[in-house]
Amino acid sequence: MRPFAARLVAGGFALMLLAACGGGDDGNDPGGGGGSGAFTAVVDGAAWSADDISIGAQTVPSVPGGFVITGTETTSGSDVRSIGMSLYNIRGTGTYALGVLPTTIGGIGTYGESVSGAGAGFSTPLTGSAGTVTLTVLTPTRIAGTFAFEASDNAAATRSITQGQFDVPLASGGALPSVPDNAGGRLTGTVGGTPYNASLVAVTQSGAAGPAFSTSSDAYAVTISLGGVTAPGSYAITEQTAAAGRYVVVNQTSGPAPRPAWGTGTGTTATVEVTSLTAARVQGTFTGTLGRQGGGAPVVVSGDFDVGLP
């Protein structure tokens, strides 16, 4: 997916989340709110603190594990700066990537400003590694944590959001959003020593045929196919197993053409350890050396995955 198109998808989904929330506290959060009401950060080195009346944190029942957190600071009369996060497939406390699409576990971060009448909007690029949010408290009445992210606009201008903190009441209607067992996925690891975190996870096969899924970021695409695999275990990957639908393939997705691909070339020796396989999810790890298609230097890969199956 091209960066601009992907940004439109992510931005559109964030707007959908906000629309589903309806904005503001809906008054259906029993037991009174929770948290201190603080929502602060540093934007390009300048302190930012949301006005109390502007802070909103809500669940999105129509989105599996969906949450939206927003706040706006008003300065110098009409100048405003806003920060938001849209999260999906969230099952509890933990650290989640920002800069990922809704098929992935995590979310996106956004920043907007209007200064002297000139407005600008920024969002986390879909690199899979544009930032993180760490949820330390998540109850039907309270959400708290820390965050940091890099956001950009379509003209390549950027904003650096650091030292983010929030501890605010959560409007949930009395319950956290349900998350189906097969919702969301993630794959993290390294490709040639470079950290990799998928911004997109797409399942291409499941059931008796064995699980297969493709993932991508702005730099690489990592595809794992486990043809015929129906139980946990250790599975060898070579260039010969590809014919049986069992392979790990890495494609470079940026840089000048022709872009290299690895995994079916001579010298491929890898192992996929499937630690859990149910009708709803596949979990495991992978490691090995992938031969380059057409010859050339191999690439060493490793990582772990947790992917929901349709």
Image: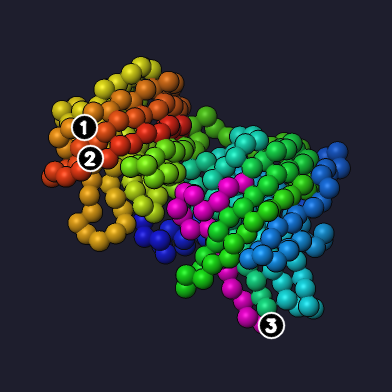
- 295 displayed left or right of 22: left
Tell me if label 3 and label 1 are in contact, CB under 8 Å. no
Q: Is residue 166 above or below residue 232?
A: below
Residue occupied by mark 1: 268
Where residue 222 appears, as percent x and y from the top left, is 33, 41
Give the SS element for disc 1. strand
The picture quadrant where one finds residue 204 is: top left
Residue 175 in which image quadrant: top right
What's the CA distance linking mark 3 and mark 1?
58 Å
Label annotation for residue 282: none
| Marks 1 & 2, CB-CB < 8 Å contact | yes
User: Where is residue 177 drawn, in percent x and y?
Assistant: 65, 38
Q: In the rendered structure, which amino acid carries the disc numbered 1? A: Thr
Q: Is residue 112 above or below residue 94?
A: below
Q: Residue 119 colored magenta? A: yes
Quadrant that contains the C terminus: top left
Vertical comparison of 26 with 277: above or below: below
Q: Which mark is residue 116?
A: 3
